[in-house]
């Protein structure tokens, strides 16, 4: 993906950089985390044109200059509601019926 | 941190164990009336208190005769950024503005980020939110991605990071770089901001039912929600109300583990925060945490992920309230509690949160499945955190479990002693402080200290 993207100066982009290499990380981490670098992603306006993976400096929303590898241009969001969980689709129907049954039994008391 | 909060914590230290908690809470100089005024101006608070008659009758349909307490909820999702965290953020942002800071920084992957971003936008302050957002494969919980989105929607700079506690040291570096205000979740500003929630509940319940609530259930994570709500209730005279903390049981999952990170379907309100923060609050990003849950919690209940998702669905279908998972953790516990209480008792769930793509229970269940967690219908008692999510088949299967709060108190005392340094001998003043900080007695503390000495 990253090798096909390209930004122009002024584009809203995302960059990634390594904040800590594994050797520099906190001492008390579980092994799986300790083996990984600590990565950071930040969005901002690119100062220069760049291709995916190139180092580029961005000006963030707060005006900080952050340099990292270009990972996305005009980054968006793709999270969704998704499909319903089959384990839950009947819950509304069943509970409404149950509530109606309970109220009918109370009305008869 | 002194520069970034405009507050000197050293003033409150009395010994390696004891500090003057109430003096620290008062040091910002805002009264409850001031805070109410700040929040009203900020568009925060005075959320609807709703009686959930359908959910109450559902519980009564299977409770023992004469049982089934009335269930209420404080609809905190009605706040501007969609949760009670607006109360917390509004006071921090007001303080930052008043003290002349150009911006604020907070480290949070939760609703607090949305709240700080929203309040900062209204106050024309810059805002940086540091989030633990992804595992090392760049895969993130849909709930956290949604939090990134909403923070950016409010104009915040979001610093998204992979898993690790170094998030907090990076936040300190950013505070140094920018000179911004530390809008810590755990400062007295934020905690005092939640006191209005407790006060509103006491007042509104008295108006509605003629009495303060029997029980208030609080979703417990870092302890701020429990602390602020309880202080507000007590301040408003609701001293007999039982304060029950509730968390999702995620025991066995390591909170700093890259591979466990996406095996959780809850990003907050779970035992991974609830237990460590209760048993050692001062692990926070301020020298002394204003959130001290053990001071206020009478009981601590856990529920499973499947129970919360079931209740989330039930609340939408029976009460017309489609809300996020965090408050519904308390709702699951409340249904369990209400079943065992007499019909004239009242149970208040003190918050809801907004929901939407990513934060919705469908999205979370789909994500769990995609990450190798088994999702199935069955008995939630068979749930194994990180391995399975068991959706109840009937509401009777919703059963909150009591955590051993006495054990948590002992573990807090052990932690306090450890942090005081080797060979430190607690004074009478320390014993009194530990008793207050664990909501127990000096005798209990003495006993624990003696047992620790022998061990």
Image (tube, coloured by chain):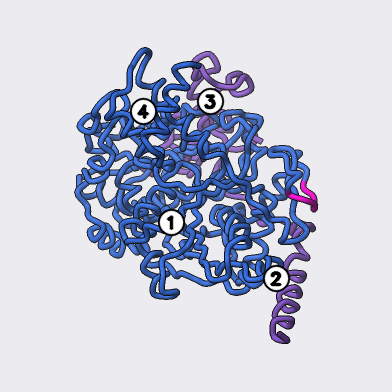
Chain colours: A purple, B blue
Q: What stretch is highlighted in magenta?
A: B375-380
Q: Which residue is drawn at 46% across and 62% down?
A: B76
Check the residue under mark 1 and report the chain it is in: B
Please state which of the two labelled residues, at mark 1 or mark 3, is closer to the viewer: 1
Please state which of the two labelled residues, at mark 3 or mark 2, is closer to the viewer: 2
Does the magenta run of residues contain B378?
yes
Q: Residue at x 61, y 67 (%)?
A: B68
Check the residue under mark 2 and report the chain it is in: B
**Main structural element of the magenta stretch: helix, strand or loop?**
strand
Q: How crowded is mark 3: few (under 14 residues within 10 Å), some or many (20 or more)?
A: many
Q: Position of residue B292 (x, y in %)?
A: 39, 41
Residue that carries the numbered disc 3 in the rendered image: A38
Q: Do labels 4 and 2 share a chain?
A: yes
Q: Do the residues labelled 3 and 4 touch (CB within 8 Å)?
A: no
Check the residue under mark 3 and report the chain it is in: A
Which numbered marker is on residue B61? 2
Q: Do the residues labelled 4 and 2 touch (CB within 8 Å)?
A: no
Taking the image as shown, residue B61 lies to the left or right of residue A44, namely right
Residue that carries the numbered disc 1 in the rendered image: B84
Does the magenta run of residues contain B163?
no
Taking the image as shown, residue B143 lies to the left or right of residue B220, namely right
In the displayed structure, B385 sits above or below B357; it is above
Residue that carries the numbered disc 4 in the rendered image: B173
Q: Is mark 1 on a helix, strand or loop?
A: loop
């Amino acid at each position: 993906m990253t090798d096909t993207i390209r930004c122009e100066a002024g584009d809203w982009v995302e960059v990634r950089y390594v904040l800590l290499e594994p050797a520099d990380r906190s001492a008390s981490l579980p092994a799986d985390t300790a083996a990984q670098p600590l990565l950071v992603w930040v969005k901002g306006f690119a100062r220069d044109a760049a291709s995916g993976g190139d180092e580029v400096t961005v000006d963030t929303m707060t005006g900080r200059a952050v340099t990292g590898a270009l990972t996305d241009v005009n980054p968006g969001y793709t999270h969704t509601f998704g499909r319903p969980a089959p384990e839950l689709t009947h819950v509304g129907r069943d509970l409404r019926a149950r509530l109606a049954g309970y109220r009918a039994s109370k009305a008869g008391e | 941190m002194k520069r970034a909060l405009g507050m000197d914590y050293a003033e409150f230290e009395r010994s390696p164990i004891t500090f003057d908690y109430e003096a620290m809470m008062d040091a910002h100089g805002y009264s409850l009336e001031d805070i109410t005024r700040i929040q009203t101006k900020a568009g925060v608070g005075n959320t609807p208190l709703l009686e959930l008659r359908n959910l109450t009758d559902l519980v009564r349909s299977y409770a023992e005769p004469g049982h089934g307490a009335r269930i209420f909820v404080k609809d905190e999702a009605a706040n501007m950024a969609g949760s009670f965290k607006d109360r917390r953020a509004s006071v921090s942002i007001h303080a930052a503005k008043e003290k002349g800071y150009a911006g604020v920084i907070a480290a949070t992957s939760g609703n607090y980020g949305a709240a700080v971003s929203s309040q900062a936008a209204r106050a024309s302050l810059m805002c940086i939110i540091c989030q633990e957002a992804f595992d090392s494969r760049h895969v993130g919980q849909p709930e956290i991605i949604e939090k990134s989105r909403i923070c950016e929607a409010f104009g915040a700079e979001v610093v998204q990071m992979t898993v690790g506690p170094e998030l907090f040291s990076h936040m300190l570096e950013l505070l140094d770089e920018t000179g911004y205000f530390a809008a810590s979740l755990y400062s007295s500003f934020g905690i005092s901001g939640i006191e209005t929630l407790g006060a509103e509940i006491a007042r509104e319940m008295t108006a509605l039912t003629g009495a303060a609530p029997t029980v208030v259930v609080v979703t417990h994570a870092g302890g701020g929600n429990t602390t602020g709500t309880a202080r507000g209730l007590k301040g408003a005279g609701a001293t007999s109300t039982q304060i029950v903390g509730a968390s999702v049981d995620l025991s066995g999952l390591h909170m700093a583990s890259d591979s466990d990170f996406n095996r959780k379907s809850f990003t907050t309100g779970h035992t991974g925060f609830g237990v460590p923060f209760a048993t050692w609050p001062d692990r926070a990003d301020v020298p002394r945490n204003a959130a001290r849950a053990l001071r206020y919690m009478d009981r601590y209940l856990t529920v499973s992920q499947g129970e919360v998702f079931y209740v989330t669905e039930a609340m939408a279908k029976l009460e017309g309230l489609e809300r996020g998972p965090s408050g519904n953790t308390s709702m699951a516990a409340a249904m369990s509690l209400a079943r065992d209480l007499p019909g004239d008792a009242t149970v208040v769930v003190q918050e809801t949160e907004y929901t939407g793509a990513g934060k919705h229970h469908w999205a979370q269940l789909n994500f769990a499945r995609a990450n190798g967690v088994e999702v199935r219908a069955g008995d939630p008692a068979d749930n194994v955190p990180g391995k399975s999510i068991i959706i109840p088949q009937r509401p009777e299967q919703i059963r909150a479990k009591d955590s051993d709060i006495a054990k948590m108190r002992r573990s807090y005392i052990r932690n306090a002693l450890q942090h005081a340094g080797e060979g430190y001998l607690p004074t009478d003043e320390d014993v009194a402080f530990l008793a207050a900080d664990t909501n127990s007695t000096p005798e209990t503390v003495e006993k624990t200290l003696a047992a620790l000495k022998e061990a």
